Image (cartoon, rainbow, N blue to C red):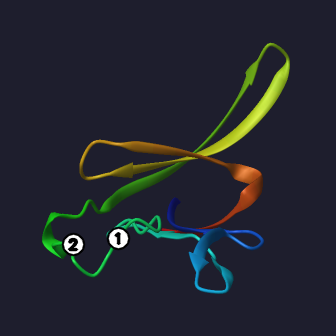
Amino acid sequence: MKIVSLQSVGLGAAQSILNGYKYNQMKFLVGEIINDGSVTIFDDISSLPKITEINYQQGDFDSYGFEIYTVHTSDGHIRVLPADKYIAEWSE
């Protein structure tokens, strides 16, 4: 089993608009361009990084347990997300 997508729980990311804020849920899909709110219409789509894999990790550090998702992108970056703030979709 592997993770094919993550979706944020709750309001998601806030973007400033003319009369306040607009809230967008964050969604990460394997094979799709990473959209963290910084993509504009002027960006060259072919040069933007794509999500290559999403992993779930858990462990202990000084008796405190933690659970995280790691989102790997084609440009070599890894984003670390708290597992209690995202819902994962699993597939074969």
Indicate the amino acid at tag 1: Val
The one nearer the camera, 15 or 27, is: 15
Mark 2, residue position: 43
Q: Residue 2 in the image: x percent, y percent?
A: 50, 59
Residue sitting at x 27%, y 82%:
41
Find the distance from the CA under tag 1 to the CA under tag 2: 7 Å
Disc 1 target residue: 39
Q: Foreground residue, 76 or 15? A: 15
Q: Quadrant of residue 24 in the image?
A: bottom right
Query: Relative to 64, is 6 on the left or the right?
Result: left
Q: Residue 28 in the image: x percent, y percent?
A: 49, 67
Q: Residue at 58% of width from left, 73% of height from top? A: 15
Query: Badge 2, how many Cα within 10 Å: few under 14, some, many 20+?
Result: few
Amino acid tagged 2: Asp
Residue lying at 15% horizontally and 64% vertically, measured from the top left: 47
Which residue is found at the position 34% from the left and 42% from the top?
77
What is the residue that sits farthest to the bottom in this orientation?
Answer: 19
Is residue 44 toward the left or the right of residue 65 in the image?
left
Label 1 close to label 2 by CB (< 8 Å): yes
Of 43 and 86, nearer the camera is 43
Locate residue 42, reporting x and y percent.
21, 77
49 w.r.t. 44: above or below: above
